[in-house]
Each structure stands twice: as structure tokens, then as C-alpha cells.
Amino acid sequence: MNKIIREATKQDSDTIAKVVLLAIGVDIERLSEHTSPFNYELVKALAEREDSQYSYKNCYVCEVDGKVAGAICSYDGARLYELREALFQELEKRGTQLGKKITDECESGELYIDSLAVFKEYRGQGIAKALIARVEEKSQLLNIPTLGLLVDNENPTAAKLYTSLGFVPVNIREFLGIPMTHMQKEV
């Protein structure tokens, strides 16, 4: 198995959109049935931009034998409001005013892992760990000593993975009405 992790490019926007939706619990096999304002077209548009949370510039992609297996999106938590502005703009273009009601999912002083997902057929091969390791390297380069993420309290598998990698729970945050555990790791 030949596994590489690389910086995402604009051409990866399709993959990034699927990863973000998978990370928030959307069944990507049924994308056409997904009617939420936070849908594939929206996330793909955000991934193509350079100024959004989901920008390809904030993502790494893992390829296994030349096929995309998963991806991770992360950014400096201090830039949340600046990066989120693109989301509000794209929602407004689509006639949706969801935007300003979104609670903060991260904080200044942490490199926030916004979205991480590995496609089903590649799970259990260490890809998520490798993607997180790449983000740890990024945090050191940016001199941001803490990684942060939210994990859904209904996803014990993800919580177990993050704990095994040294993340510890720091508080509970409600995000889009769902209580989630905010976890951090010092790097």
C-alpha cells in the first residue's frame, strides 16, 4: 500500500466537500437527498475559496495507491471569525440566514481540526492518525502549541481515537444545537 499525505489543491474541492459532510454525519451516498442549507454545493464552493474554513488551503488529502482515502481541514482558531465570513457570504447568496446563529467551535491559541474523515473502504489503516500527525507538524510550523477539535458525544469511536493520540476533554460545547466534547492536545 502506497500512502501519501499532501496539501490539498483547488481540484480537491469535491473530496473536501464530501469529507466535511461525512465528518458532520451526512450520508455521502445520498447527497442528492440532503436538503439542509449546509449541503454539498455550499461546502464545495467554500472549499474552492481561499478565505474559508473549508478552503483547500486549510486541508490535507491522503491518497492510497493514487486514490483519495480521506482528508483533514484545520486552521488557526484565532481566525475563526475571519474565515467564517465566507460561509455567511455563501449562505446569503443561497438565500439562507442561518449564519450568525452559529456558536464558536474553537478558540484562539489552538490549531483547530474542523473536519476529518476517512472514506469507509480505507478505515482501520491508520489514515486518520497520519492526517492528524500532519496537522501536528503544521501546528509546530505555525507556532500554535495546542490542537483542538470537537467530537460528537454520540461518536465513541472517534473519541477513543483522539484519546489514544493524547487529546483530553476540556469542556462541553454546543455546536448547531448538539452537545460536543471539546478536546485538546499539547504538541
Image (cartoon, rainbow, N blue to C red):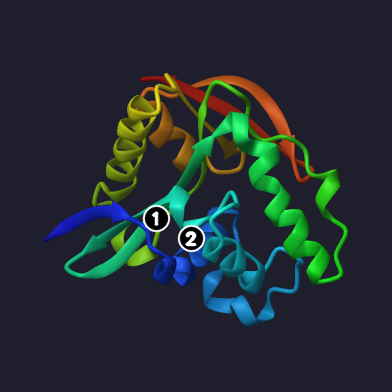
Image quarter where the N terminus lies is bottom left
In percent of width and height, residue 83 lies at 64, 45
User: Residue 71 shows which numbered tag?
Assistant: 1
Q: Residue at x 44, y 23 (%)?
A: 144
Cβ–Cβ under 8 Å for marks 1 and 2: yes
Judging by the rendered image, the residue that carries numbered circle 2 is: 19
Q: Is residue 58 left or right of residue 138?
A: right
Residues 119 and 108: in front is 108
In percent of width and height, residue 125 lies at 24, 52
- Secondary structure type for disc 1: strand
Badge 2: residue crowd in 10 Å (few <14, some 14–19, many ≥20): many
Q: Is residue 2 left or right of residue 116?
A: left
> Looking at the picture, which amino acid does disc 1 mark?
Ala
Q: Residue furthest bottom?
A: 32
Location of residue 27 (image quadrant): bottom right
Q: Residue at x 71, y 63 (%)?
A: 38
| Image position of 151 with respect to 33: above or below | above
Give the Cα separation between the discs numbered 1 and 2.
6 Å
Q: Residue at x 36, y 20 (%)?
A: 187
Q: Residue at x 60, y 28 (%)?
A: 182
Location of residue 35 (image quadrant): bottom right
